[in-house]
Amino acid sequence: MTAQLDAPHDLVGIGIGPSNLSLAALAHGLPQQGAGELATAFYEQRRDFRWHPGLLIDGTTLQVPFLADLVTLADPSSPWSFLSYLKHKERLYPFYFAEQFHIHRAEYDAYCRWVAGRVPGLHFGHQVDAVRWNPERDLFEVDFTQLDPAGEAEALGRTYTRNLALGIGTAPHVPEPLRPLAEAPTVPVIHSADYLDNRERILGAEHVTVIGSGQSGAEVFLDLLRARPTGRERLTWLARTPSFAPMEYSKLGLEHFTPDYTRYFHSLPEPVRDHLVPAQWQLHKGIDTATIAAIHDELYRRTLHGGWPDAVLTPGVTVRTAGRVATTKVELHLEHAEQGARSRLTTDAVVLATGYRERPLTRLLAGLDPYLRKDSSGRPRIDDRYRMVLDPSVTGSIFVQNGERHTHGVGAPDLGLAAWRSAAILNTLTGKEPYPQPPRTAFTTFGLEQREHTRPRPAGELLPLVEHP
Ligand SMILES: Cc1cc2nc3c(=O)[nH]c(=O)nc-3n(C[C@H](O)[C@H](O)[C@H](O)COP(=O)(O)OP(=O)(O)OC[C@H]3O[C@@H](n4cnc5c(N)ncnc54)[C@H](O)[C@@H]3O)c2cc1C
C-alpha cells in the first residue's frame, strides 16, 4: 500500500455525481464568500464525469428547470452556474431565444462535465473501498483503489479527513424474479440504465418488451416506437402500476421539493415518514405529461391511414417469473391482479425500466459501524443538517447527499435541492453561513406548528391546539 500521509483534508467527498459536484463547486467558491478556504478532495470511481449515459436519449430533457443546476439556487453569482457555462460556450443568445426552461439531458451532462473539468480537487478513476475512524488522530481514514482506464486496480491509497460527504447515489435495480434473465447473455435483456449502449441490438429484435411505468420506461418505449416501422412495431409495454400515471407537476405539488417540506418531513415520527414515501409515489415515480403526450401522438400518427399500431400497452401487470425459451427467446409469466388472470408472453428482447435503489452503505462504512446510530429499521439516523448521527466521541461529521430519503423525504434525489443541501452542509462545516438560506421557501405551510412559526398572527387570534404525543 502506498500510504499518503500528507496533511488531512477538511472534507473528503465520496462519489462525484451532481450532488457532490455541487458541493465541490460551492466549496470552491468559499473564499469569495468570506468563510476561508477548505481543503477538499472528491473521489469518483468512473474515469470521468458521466450523468446517466445510458439514458441520454436524443431529445430527452431534465424534469426540473435549468435553475436547478449545481449552484444557482444557493448562489446565482457562482462561476459554476449553467448560465456561466453558456456564456463560456458563447451560446447565451441561442439559449435566450430557445426559451427552454427544461434543458436537454445531454446539455445538462455537458454542463456538469465542464464544471468537473475545472473545479480543482476532483479525482476520477478512484474507487473508495473503506472508511474508518481513527480515534488517536481524530480523523477519518479513507482507503481507495486507483483504477486504470480499463477499470482494473492500479494502485492503493489512503487519505485522511476531518469530515466526509457521501454522494454515492443510486444503482440500477432488477426485481428478484427477473434477475436470472438479466444474467442470460444470449437474449438482450438489459436495464434501462444501459439502454443506449444496447439500442441497436434491441432494435434488431423481432419483438421487444419494456417493463416499468416510470419516466425511463416511457422514454425507452417512445424511442423504440419512433424507430420501428408503422404497423410492424412489435412492442409491448408492461407496468405494475394500475395506470400509466402522470408525474405530479402542479406548482403547489412541486412545493414538496422545497427545503420547507424537507424540514417538515424530517420532523415527523419515523413510522409516519416510512408511510409517506411510498404513498407519494406520484411525486417521483410517474411519467412526465409531455412524454405521455408524445407517446400518444406517435401512436395516433400511426393510425392516420387506418389500422392500429402493433403495440400493446398494459398497466396493472406483474411479471411473476421469467425464463429463457431455447436460446433466443424469453418467456414472461404475467399476472393481472384486478382481473385475477394469468398469461405468458414470448419476446425477443426485454428492457427492464425497473428503477434504481440507493447504493448500500454497509460495505463502505463497515469499519464505522460501532459509531453509527441507527433507526428501528437499521438505517443510519441523519440529523436535520444532513449529518449521520454518530457516537459523541467522533469529532468529525459524515454528511449524506441523496441517501437520506428515509429522513428527508422525496426531495433527496431531486436536483432542485442539491445546491441547497450543499450550501447547508458548507454552512454547518464552516460555522460561518457563507451561503445564507432564507427561512421560508414555500407558499404551502406544512404542519400546524410550522405555520405558527412562519405566519404573522393578528393580535388577539387564538393559537390552534397542537397536541404533542
Ligand atoms: C435517468 C435519470 C434521470 C434523472 N433525471 C432527473 C431530473 O431530470 N431531475 C431531477 O431532479 N432528478 C433526476 N434524476 C434523479 C437523480 O437523483 C439525479 O439525476 C442525480 O444523478 C443524483 O446525483 P447523485 O450525485 O446523488 O448520484 P449519482 O448521479 O448516482 O452519482 C453517484 C456517483 O458516485 C459514484 N460512486 C459510488 N460508489 C463509489 C465509491 N465507492 N467510490 C467512488 N465513487 C463511487 C458513482 O460512480 C456515481 O458516479 C434522474 C435519475 C435518473 C436515473
Image (spheres, rainbow, N blue to C red):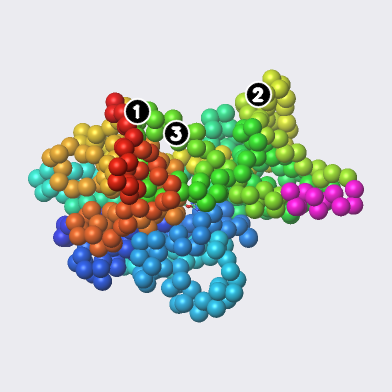
Res. 127 visible in picture:
no
The spot of residue 100 in percent (x, y) is 57, 66
Residue at 31% of width from left, 57% of height from top?
437
Mark 1 vs mark 3, foreground winner is 3
Q: Quadrant of residue 80?
A: bottom left
The spot of residue 251 in percent (x, y) is 52, 51
- Inspect the image, locate mark 2, and give the three-letter code of the amino acid beneath it: Ala
- The mark that comes first in sequence, 3 or 2, is 3
Few, some or many C-alpha atoms within 10 Å of disc 3 (few <14, some 14-19, many ≥20)? some
Question: In the rendered view, does 433 fall on the left or right side of 84?
Answer: left
The spot of residue 20 in percent (x, y) is 36, 56
Highlighted magenta segment, given as a residue range: 296-306
Residue at 69% of width from left, 30% of height from top?
331
Q: Which mark is residue 337?
A: 2
Circles 1 and 3: CB atoms closer than 8 Å: no
Is 449 in front, or is 408?
449
| The C terminus, quarter of image | top left
Decide if ligand 1 comes within 8 Å of the CB at mark 3.
Answer: no
Decide if ligand 1 comes within 8 Å of the CB at mark 1.
Answer: no
Res. 136 visible in picture:
yes
Question: In the rendered view, does 150 fall on the left or right side of 320?
Answer: left
Circles 3 and 2: CB atoms closer than 8 Å: no
